[in-house]
């Protein structure tokens, strides 16, 4: 049975996200780092004065993608680590997970994003649904640097975000309540070992957990304690009671 998400606040949440994106793209500090953002924010502002919902959505998603890729640079050593485990480079997970997470992120929640990039997705979870802590796990030092600028512009307190520069294989997930990830590696060769390690850690934990997985590869590795309660071909959601 497909889970029915509460869409009561979808319009209000979309407006919050859009306003956050405007704040980021129009910040002088961020424009000094990424000079072309107004090429994406200005058309969106203009279109919002019209009733062309399709064009508004396209412009909104274009701005999202530009923000998501800001700072996407890896050192030679960082890139080698990703290559060795068949890793993907900074794919955007979309707006849908942000809109659907409301019922699952509580004020006391600890959220983690595996392979967070510049942290945009995790920052938006914190921005929309303030909670105890968001753990941003990312290999690229440059992307973390950019993410900290995003955090400052969005006025998210330092205590609410933990930036962890490390291989996701090295990071404990014991304390989290909500896990977000976009398929971190191709499920072949050394990439399989990554999923085996992540699933081993998740399968051995005793606490309840909700997982939002984009382009999911976890389902073949998680044990029967994890039940899929929603999937649409893009987002797959698991819950362990």
Image (tube, helix red, strand yellow):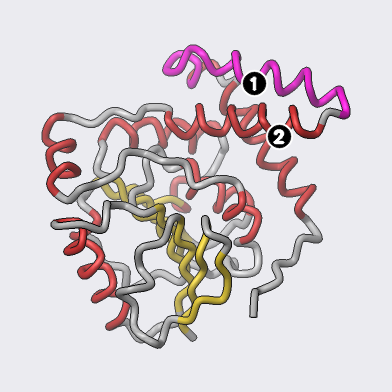
Label 1: element kind:
helix
- Magenta region, residue range: 30-51
Does the magenta run of residues contain 42? yes
Which residue does the image show at 41% across and 36% down from the upper left? 147
Q: Write down the residue under mark 1.
A: 41
Q: Quadrant of the N terminus?
A: bottom right
Q: Is residue 210 left or right of residue 194?
A: right
**202 lies above or below 52:** below
**235 lies above or below 39:** below
Badge 1: how crowded within 10 Å, few (<14), some, or many (20+)? many
Which residue does the image show at 78% across and 22% down from the upper left? 47
Numbered disc total: 2
Q: Is residue 95 left or right of residue 218?
A: right
Which residue is nearer to you in this view: 226 or 157?
226
Does the magenta run of residues contain 136? no
Q: Is residue 213 left or right of residue 195?
A: right
**5 lies above or below 75:** below
Foreground: disc 2 or disc 1:
2
Q: Write down the residue under mark 2.
A: 57
Which residue does the image show at 24% across and 61% down from the upper left? 171
């Amino acid at each position: 049975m497909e889970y029915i998400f509460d869409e009561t606040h979808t319009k209000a949440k979309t407006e919050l996200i859009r306003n956050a994106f405007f704040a980021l793209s129009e910040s002088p500090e961020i424009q000094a780092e990424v000079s072309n953002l107004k090429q994406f924010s200005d058309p969106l502002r203009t279109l919002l004065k019209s009733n062309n919902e399709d064009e508004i959505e396209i412009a909104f998603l274009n701005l999202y993608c530009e923000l998501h890729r800001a700072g996407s640079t890896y050192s030679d050593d960082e890139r080698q680590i990703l290559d060795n485990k068949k890793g993907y480079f900074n794919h955007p997970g979309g707006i849908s997970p942000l809109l659907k997470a409301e019922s699952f992120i509580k004020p006391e929640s600890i959220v983690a994003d595996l392979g967070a990039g510049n942290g945009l997705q995790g920052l938006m979870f914190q921005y929309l649904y303030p909670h105890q802590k968001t753990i941003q796990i990312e290999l690229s030092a440059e992307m973390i640097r950019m993410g900290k600028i995003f955090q400052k512009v969005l006025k998210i307190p330092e205590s609410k975000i933990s930036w962890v520069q490390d291989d996701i294989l090295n990071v404990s997930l014991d304390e989290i309540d909500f896990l977000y990830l976009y398929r971190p590696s191709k499920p072949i060769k050394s990439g399989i070992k990554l999923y085996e390690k992540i699933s081993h850690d998740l399968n051995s934990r005793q606490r309840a957990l909700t997982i939002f997985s984009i382009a999911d590869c976890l389902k073949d590795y998680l044990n029967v304690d994890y039940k899929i309660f929603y999937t649409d071909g893009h987002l797959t959601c698991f819950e362990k009671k």
